[in-house]
Image: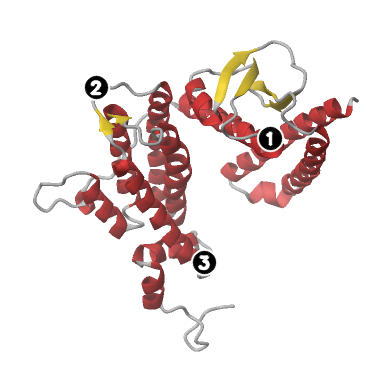
Amino acid sequence: RKMSKSLGNSPDPLQLIEKYSADGVRVGMLLCSPAGNDLLFDESLPEQGRNFTNKLWNAFRLVKSWQVEKDTRPTEASERAIVWFYERLKQGVREIEEDFNQYRISEALMTAYKLFWDEFSSWYLEIVKPEYQKPIDSRTYQSTIEMFEVLLKILHPFVPFITEEIWHLLKDRTAPGSTLMFEKAPSVKPIDNEKIKHFEQVKEIITFIRNTRAQLQISPKEKLALLINPLDYSSDFDPVILKLGNLSEIKMISEKPEGAVSLITAEAEYYIPVGELHNEEEELKKLNEELVYTRGFLESVMKKLNNDKFVGNAPQKVLDTEYKKKADAETRIKSLEERIALLSGN
């Protein structure tokens, strides 16, 4: 319902700030205010903003809890993660700069939000995080601090209070009047898009491995093998896949193996031999359920793409996303159908 003072249904900003923090309310307001649209406010939005600031603080606490050991080399997985995230960070800076230039403040926030939450916290920190009660090498730690500083600069316009606090706690700031407010925003730099593209493949592979474990109820501690029939596959990030997937090996093959769960993409065919680690009847049931869902999802995407009004008015970025959804769904359907046929003996 439309908010107004006469109806008495407008939120009290001071109460919202007391409940969700000033930073949380800023994020909530920006999340509901894309350019040119009405503000569809809901109290879950400042709550989401507060959760985001909690995520920022928890990431800071994690990084500062690491014991640093000098004169040790980064692991191969950490080296690859550093290379990837520096490129991803540059890409994020460029996207945010473009959003600001076109006054798309809400979109700039979402780009920064996802860059920190989805990429830095969920992927980068997971890769470089040392084993329990073990130290981290100084180079990886220093690179992580530098990346965190860039992220704080990016996020400062949206969550100024917590970023300023973390800025001073992350590293000693001894200069008089030192403040994040006066720091220069990160500048746009050339990007190695191939590194970013290859890491997107890595995400897909690791998600496939984790989903296989979940569906077949295989313990995360049990090591698996990953077999790859490559088409356009890059092995640059194999150390990352070995670590996050908890694999015993990654092996290139030329023929499809028997008794393996598969994932087929444009870059390669991936197989995980599961042998006697799963119940075929239970897997068939889950595969059929996923097939029904994926077909329904593809149908919903095709309704959009077959709608001339949608195709004619949607920005190219949105159309590209929908076409990617279509291609991914078609690939997944083919993979599911092949797996079902194999288990059914057809």
Q: Earlier in the sequence, mark 2 or mark 1?
A: 2
**Tags 2 and 1 in contact by the CB under 8 Å rule?**
no
**Quadrant position of the C terminus in the picture:** top right
Residue 169 lies, with reference to residue 4, above or below; the image says: above
The Cα–Cα distance between marks 1 and 3, rounded to whole angstroms, is 31 Å
Residue 317 lies, with reference to residue 164, above or below; the image says: above
Classify mark 2: residues with Cα within 10 Å, few (<14), some (14-19) or many (20+): few
Under mark 2, the amino acid is: Asp
Residue 328 occupies quadrant: top right
x and y percent of residue 302 in the render? Answer: 76, 44
Q: Earlier in the sequence, mark 1 or mark 3?
A: 3
x and y percent of residue 259 in the render? Answer: 77, 22
Label at residue 44: 3
x and y percent of residue 86 in the render? Answer: 37, 32
Residue 27 occupies quadrant: bottom left
Task: Say which of marks 2 and 3 sits in front.
Answer: 2
The one of 267 and 32 positioned closer to us in this rendering? 267
Residue matched to label 2: 71
Task: Say which of marks 1 and 3 sits in front.
Answer: 3
Horizontal relation, residue 188 to residue 256: left or right: left
Residue at the farthest right position: 346
Element type at marker 1? helix
The Cα–Cα distance between marks 2 and 3, rounded to whole angstroms, is 47 Å
Whether residue 30 is visible here, answered yes or no, is: no
Residue matched to label 1: 328
The Cα–Cα distance between marks 2 and 1, rounded to whole angstroms, is 44 Å
Residue at the farthest top position: 254
x and y percent of residue 224 in the render? Answer: 61, 24
Residue in the picture at 31% in, 21% down: 73
Horizontal relation, residue 114 to residue 232: left or right: left
**Tags 1 and 3 in contact by the CB under 8 Å rule?**
no
Under mark 3, the amino acid is: Ser
